[in-house]
Image: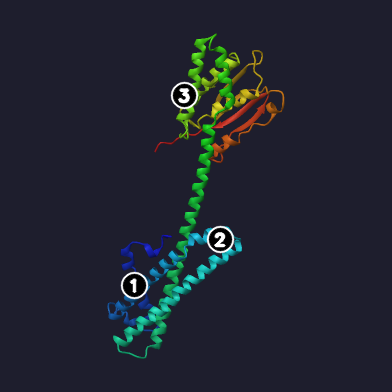
Amino acid sequence: MKTFTINNQQKWLRFLLPFPLGVVAYVLILLVFDTLNQFSSNFFSQEVAVTTMLTFILFESLRALLKLIDKRFPLMEKLKTNAESTVDSKEISHSMRIVLIPFICLVLSVLLISLLVGVYFRFVLFISDFGTELIVFNSVYGVMAILYAIIHVSTSFLAVHKQIHYKQEKDLRKGMETDLEKFKMQINPKLLYDGLENLISIVHSQPRLAEHFVNHLSKIYRYNLDNRHVELVELQQELQLSQSLLHILNVKHTNTITFEARLSDDWMYRQIIPCTLSSLIQELVSRSIINEYQPMHIILEGKGDNLTFSCRHNPKIGLNGNSDWNLTLINKAYSFFSDRKQLEISYNNQQIHINIPLFEIEEE
């Protein structure tokens, strides 16, 4: 697993960072020995170069060690495994990693610094008694190693959790896209069956009407195919589709279904999910009693940010006609864009009202 930590930052940072940290280590060592007054005269002395070199070697060694640990024991796999277990085991596993990595880095720091400081005092300064200095060097660099390890562990967990959340969001979006596609691609078998049945009944007696019927039927299914990968369309396109659908439905219902859009021109360019109006019209027609004495008049009006779809409520007798509307699929499609935008049905004075959310695309 490749994590975005201080270990794999730009190479130039790996070479520049040891210098200021080496100076800090040098100052801490001087403070321990109460000789800070020597700092100004010894700033560019041999000791500063030694502490800088020790810092560089230690950090590169820690970087290599942590890279090896991440490769051998990936944090992503550990989190995946823990996700299937209990919460307690996950907390223990994470806690063990947080404790073990700083401890391993501390052990490496003590071993490495003891070796390098021993070589420096014995073979460069020719001093054999440096026990106190060794303790001070190990203390300072031990703290630096622990801090380095804590930063690495923190950024590693942050990076992995971001990857997990990104994958969850991606899966959620994929599921919503599937719901959207299901809604847009649904083909009402009853419409197709009734359409073909009506076509057979008029093809000989009214060939001109049959020709128009076929044209409108083809427009409906061509619209579905053309917009299967389109998330939103302009309202005027939906109204054109609705006119084709009404032409087909009126062949069966002898022109007893009318459709009126009381909308200004600026509403025509607002966005809507493809096939929303046609699905509602088909559902409404299938649930309602329609004849020459009880015609259906559908009205579209704009109220606020919503489109109001309304007509007289005249349900068919029986369980099917009186059952609640099932808007699950279409509301799942709308949840792809916003959880707050959902279709709502209300009844008032023998009228059915459906509020349809619309969208406006802001141009940047």
Which of the two labelled residues, at mark 2 and mark 3, occupies the earlier sequence position? 2
Q: Which residue lies furthest to the right in this view?
A: 318
Q: In this view, does 300 lie above or below 62?
A: above
Q: What kind of residue is marked 1?
A: Phe
Q: What kind of residue is marked 3?
A: Asp
Position of the N terminus, as image quadrant, is bottom left
List the residue tagged with mark 1: 56
Name the one closer to the observer, 198 or 162: 198
- Residue 134, image x and y in percent? 39, 84
Q: What kind of residue is marked 2?
A: Asn
- Residue 250, image x and y in percent? 57, 16
Alpha carbon of mark 2 to alpha carbon of mark 3: how far? 57 Å
Label 3 crowd (10 A; few <14 / some 14-19 / many >=20): few
Can residue 278 be spotted in the picture?
yes
Left or right for 8, reference 332: left
List the residue tagged with mark 3: 265
Label 3: state its secondary structure.
helix
Label 1: state its secondary structure.
helix
Q: Is residue 262 above or below residue 26?
A: above
Alpha carbon of mark 3 to alpha carbon of mark 1: how far? 69 Å
Position of the C terminus, as image quadrant, is top left
List the residue tagged with mark 2: 82
Left or right for 228, reference 249: left
Name the one closer to the observer, 178 or 59: 178
Which of the two labelled residues, at mark 2 and mark 1, occupies the earlier sequence position? 1
Label 2: state its secondary structure.
helix
Label 3 close to label 1 by CB (< 8 Å): no
Left or right for 65, reference 94: left
